[in-house]
């Protein structure tokens, strides 16, 4: 008997459930059937996820009593482009998708972001369901309704808020994930602890990334998701507090935008970004060095990078990174907004970063061994 946890994102008529567990797919056949009034499932799948878990996906659709229209895509950032969006939207229209149907995203965060955006704009909005197959997508990207693609100017700069109707996070799907991708997802669980849940952080610190399996993994995912659900419920469209979820992302996105294509994994960039956010908080005198070192130690203990020099895809330049940071979506009035921390579990929004000081800081950090 597998264990499941149910988390609800309370957003009035757009509320939805996240089913977390080993076997969550099989557990959710009835829910899925209820979301497919036309008796068919349109599934957009990551090629790798399909190769590993196609049998279970087909069984789920059959158990739900649905027919299947399958669209297979190559996962990864290359999927999140204008071309990818245009092709997918045309494919959905060719299948005659109707507004009351739910398009299903079966893959990692890249597939989920792309499918969500396509669902948001096709016929001015069809439903969609997230079936995340990476740890990062299960703990973070499948929840909260942020969808989008990358543009020449940077990551995720075109998109829409469009909430899924259901999220099925089956931890059994993670068994085939490469270690590097598992670590990247772990970074986002740590992020939840570092932002506002010291107890979760301390649990992760004592168990370590390697100890996270079985029910401990299900609980960590469900706790991280429940934390995100609370913040999304308070501030769905990121007018304020939701920006906290971007801890490590302002730095991280800048590295991703600067990195040689295909070299960097999102969670690795976020890991270094979180370490930098704590280091910069110490520089500003708002966070103790002890807490920053503890945060960095937990990141490093998971086998994640903590210094810019540990990141592939470089070399990076401080002024170019800061220029990238000025196009971040959190900014207002052309000023950089950072997410910093007063301590572990005490992240805060810091508007109007001093550009020169930030550049000087990054120059030092880029050399740190
Ligand atoms: N919308 C949001 O709120 C949000 C939040 C965080 C991150 N993101 C986005 O998520 C993306 C990163 O997501 P990701 O880390 O899942 O990357 P990804 O989608 O590129 O997946 C990582 C790799 O794992 C492979 N894969 C997927 N499932 C697998 C499985 N079960 N077994 C083996 N291989 C599998 C994929 O083919 C890919 O090569 C980024 O584009 C980031 O911007 C979005």
Image (spheres, helix red, strand yellow):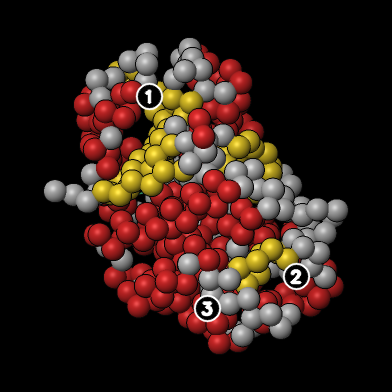
Foreground label between 2 and 1 = 1
Up/down of 142 relative to 164, above or below: below
Residue identifier under label 2? 318
Give the CA separation, mark 1 to mark 3. 43 Å
Q: Position of residue 136 (x, y in %)?
A: 44, 54
Q: Secondary structure at mark 1?
A: loop
Nearer to us in this view, 5 or 250: 5
Residue identifier under label 3? 296
Q: Is residue 204 visible?
A: yes
* Tag 2 near tag 1, CB within 8 Å: no
* Tag 1 near tag 3, CB within 8 Å: no
Q: Position of residue 76 (x, y in %)?
A: 50, 46
Nearer to us in this view, 1 or 66: 1
Foreground label between 1 and 3 = 1
Nearer to us in this view, 77 or 31: 31
Question: Which quadrant of the rendered structure holds the C terminus?
Answer: bottom right
Residue drawn where x is 47% and y is 18% of the image = 100
Rate crowding at label 3 as few (under 14), some (14 to 19) or many (20 or more) other CA atoms within 10 Å. Answer: many
Q: Position of residue 202 (x, y in %)?
A: 41, 75
Q: Is residue 81 visible?
A: no
Q: Position of residue 343 (x, y in %)?
A: 58, 77
Residue 52: name its quadrant. Answer: top left
Q: Secondary structure at mark 2?
A: helix
Residue identifier under label 1? 35
């Amino acid at each position: 008997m597998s264990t499941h946890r149910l988390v609800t994102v309370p957003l009035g008529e757009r509320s939805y459930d996240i089913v977390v567990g080993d076997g969550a797919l099989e557990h959710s056949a009835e829910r899925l059937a209820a979301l497919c009034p036309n008796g068919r499932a349109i599934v957009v799948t990551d090629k790798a996820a399909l190769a590993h878990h196609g049998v279970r996906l087909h069984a789920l659709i059959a158990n739900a009593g649905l027919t299947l229209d399958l669209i297979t895509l190559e996962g990864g950032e290359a999927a999140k482009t204008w071309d990818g969006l245009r092709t997918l939207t045309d494919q959905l229209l060719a299948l005659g998708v109707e507004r009351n149907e739910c398009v299903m995203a079966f893959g990692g965060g890249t597939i989920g972001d792309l499918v969500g955006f396509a669902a948001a704009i096709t016929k001015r909005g069809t439903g969609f369901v997230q079936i995340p197959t990476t740890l990062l997508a299960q703990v973070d990207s499948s929840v909260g309704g942020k969808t989008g693609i990358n543009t020449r100017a940077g990551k995720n700069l075109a998109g829409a808020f469009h909430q899924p109707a259901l999220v099925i996070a089956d931890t059994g799907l993670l068994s085939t994930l490469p270690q590097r991708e598992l670590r990247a997802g772990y970074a986002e669980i740590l992020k939840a602890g570092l932002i506002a849940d010291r107890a979760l952080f301390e649990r992760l610190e004592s168990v370590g990334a390697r100890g996270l399996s079985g029910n401990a993994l299900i609980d960590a995912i469900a706790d991280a998701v429940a934390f995100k659900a609370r913040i999304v419920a308070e501030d769905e469209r990121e007018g304020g507090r939701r920006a906290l979820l971007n801890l490590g992302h302002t730095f991280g996105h800048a590295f991703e935008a600067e990195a040689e294509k295909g070299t960097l994994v999102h969670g690795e960039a976020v890991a270094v970004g979180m370490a930098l956010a704590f280091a910069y908080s110490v520089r500003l005198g708002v966070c103790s060095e002890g807490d920053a070192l503890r945060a960095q130690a937990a990141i490093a203990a998971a086998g994640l990078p903590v210094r810019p020099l540990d990141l592939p895809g470089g070399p990076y330049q401080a002024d170019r990174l800061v220029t990238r940071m000025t196009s971040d979506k959190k900014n207002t009035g052309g000023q950089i907004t950072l997410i910093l921390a007063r301590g572990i579990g005490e992240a805060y929004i810091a508007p109007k970063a001093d550009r020169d000081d930030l550049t000087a800081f990054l120059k030092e950090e880029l050399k740190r061994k």
